[in-house]
Image (spheres, rainbow, N blue to C red):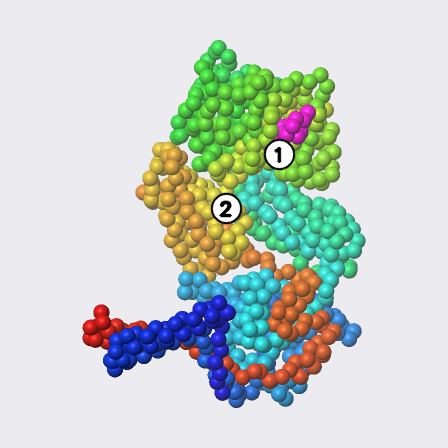
Amino acid sequence: MSRWSFAASIPVLVFGTILWLGTAWLCYANWLRTGRRKVIARLEGLRFVLVTLLAFTLLRPEMIWLIKRTEQPAIAVLCDTSASMQTRDVAAASNILSRAEWLQQQRTAQLWKPLEKNARVTVEDFAAPAQSANGLKAKAEEGTDLNHALETVLQHQRNLKAVLLLTDGDWNLGKSPVSAATRFREQNIPIFAVAVGRETPLPDLFLEGVSAPAYGLLGEQISIPFKIQSHLPREVKTTISLFNGQREETKKVITIPAQGELQESILWSPRSVGEVTATLKLPVESDEGLPLNNEQSFRISVRVDTLKVLVVDSLPRWEYRFLRNALARDPGVEMHCLLFHPGMAPGGGKQYLPAFPGSKELLSRYDVIFLGDVGLGQNELTENDAKLIKGLVEQQASGLVFLPGRRGRQQTFSQSALQDLLPVVLDEKKPQGLGFQNEAALLLTTFGKRHWLTRFDADENRNEEIWKQLPGFYWSAAVEKSRPGTEVLAVHSALRNSWGRIPLLVTRSYGNGKVLFMGTDSAWRWRRGVEDKYHYRFWSQVVRWMAHQRHLSEKQGIRLSFSPETPQLGDTIFLQSTVLDAAGSPLEQGPVIGKITAPSGRSERVEFSSTEGGWGVFKSSFSPQESGPYQVQVAAERHGRKLETAFLVAPPQREKQGQPVNLEILREIADISGGNAVILESFGQILQKISVLPEPRPMEKRLRLWSNPWWGGVILLLLGIYWTGRKLAGMV
């Protein structure tokens, strides 16, 4: 059975009719004008046929054949086998089953067998589609790809009558399933979805994320942030513990809000050097439905490093003296000092430098530089020194601390290369800063309360109380505002301007390094009554935080850092290697070659490209194709530099147990396709609706003449014959 279909608009139809009638009149008139010659009659007849075909084409004609289906209709049952289906929240008689167990029961019982009376039933599993990388088979990515499952059924099943989708609806991978549902609607194939699981979350505590750093120093406290999700209807006071193997290393009392989220951190001091696999554990509450998500393991490298610090100032003010004493007592710090006395040559003595290390070779040894009440000028820093400091921070991931003083010499940096590094805008009209009769204090911002630099106590509330009790200050730098892209940790407790409260403790990232601005010279007063308890700890944390990226992995003459520190599958990992030659100078030219070995044993060669500036920095990147531990080798063989290290690529945490079913997306899919979506208790109703569905419509075969190349070829052929005939007849 066949029929014609046209899709022309009324204006096109009118135009085609006028064109056809006009051509008919013109052809007849031309035939009469030429004496009714036979050859002219044939040519005008051919012209009329050509115009008729063109006018017919404007109507966008389609020939449609209806083909009756002879094979038995098919019903596809799609069963979700993703990790979220392990959630145990399905009530069955006197037992509680996981979603996967309930689904397996249905398969064993073949509850959809009644559908086989009028259709061919196929049962298929789905989760994530198979993944491959560079022609090699890799582990399938964890997740639920509803769109891929539906598209696959549509492509491979013939005479499809309906789809029964059994899932929790936790779509977290691939394209939106709405796309597939639209294609099902076009072919009049309904999707019936059953939400397997609860509509509300299980009572549960979930240790969702642990963001441990890649390395830590022996004997130093390491801050390990974590996040806990609570689906319990009550507040929980409990103790989280950190284990190294079977040994409990440290613990912390925490309070988790009801139906809320807790972001905290635990401090740990490692006892031995080496690669450590540690575990955070949260005790299981009696009313938790998912006891298996209360712990997470992570890897961390524990090393012994000595950080090199340079302190530059003008006068030996109180802030300088106590900062120098604190760093000098720090066993993890090697400190050098440089004092530019006004009108005098730089001071000398133990740990003092006779001059600023004004070359890349000398300056590149330092991890952190403190710039006190010093600026550019005679017997101070030079413009070239400022450029070197900028390059050190930008290229080699070193840290820079601005500690302005009452002489206001840091105002001179506004006309130097260091201008771009300042986290704040200084008031040029008040270079000597602001003095106060009444004591002011540093007031932590919301961001500052959670930052590692400001952490004197692991408990956030106690830490805030400590900051409130710290002695204040009577002088601060004249700051107008913070710059874009910075993080304000603390502000002036009393002063504000049109921009808001005056920012006095501000951080920012610049290039590969970090910058800190401390807008008061009175941190030394924190020693009152407690000696160095807080003053020493603060500056010790500053030094380690600012040098962290620079020391992710290193060996004699070569360092390697990578970002992000805790990569997941799907991330692009950026590698940066700093290489020194045999003389200790930054390497200006390579080659620097890397070898990356995946958990499966597959190796990949990467080339590092040098960066501008001549700081011995070489960069590369790669995208991991599988999760697990990676071995990395970086070598500059011409210079005898080689480094081996490892890092862990975690799988993406798409699949989460304990989450409620996503009934909303299932209803959207079903509505678009003409089906229905129900909760688990209505499973029987869905089977009934599927069983009474009509037979699939006959298949349609369409031939679009208006877009068919053969149709266009016929018209062109006739046109060629027409013009050839006119030429032979002497009409051209």
The answer for how far apart the CA atoms under marks 2 and 1 are is 23 Å
Residue 246 visible in this rendered orientation of the protein: no
* x then y, percent, for residue 206: 68, 56
* x then y, percent, for residue 306: 51, 34
State the mark number for residue 352. none
Instruction: Name the residue rendered at 63%, 45% in the picture.
Output: 225
**Most common SS among magenta residues:** strand
Q: Which corner quadrant of the image does residue 161 belong to?
A: bottom right
The quadrant of the image that shows the C terminus is bottom left
Q: Between 45 and 417, which is closer to the camera in this rendering? A: 45
684 over 177 or under it: above or below = below
Is 615 one of the magenta-colored residues? Answer: no
Amino acid at the residue labelled 2? Ser
Is 496 one of the magenta-colored residues? Answer: yes
Q: Which corner quadrant of the image does residue 330 belong to?
A: top right
Q: Residues within 10 Å of mark 2 (few under 14, many from 20)?
A: some
Residue that mark 2 sits on: 563
349 over 560 or under it: above or below = above
Q: Between 501 and 708, which is closer to the camera in this rendering? A: 708
Residue that mark 1 sits on: 488
The mark nearer the N terminus, 2 or 1, is: 1
* x then y, percent, for residue 323: 59, 24
Residue 257 visible in this rendered orientation of the protein: yes
Q: Which residues are magenta?
A: 495-506
Instruction: Name the residue rendered at 67%, 78% in the picture.
Output: 106
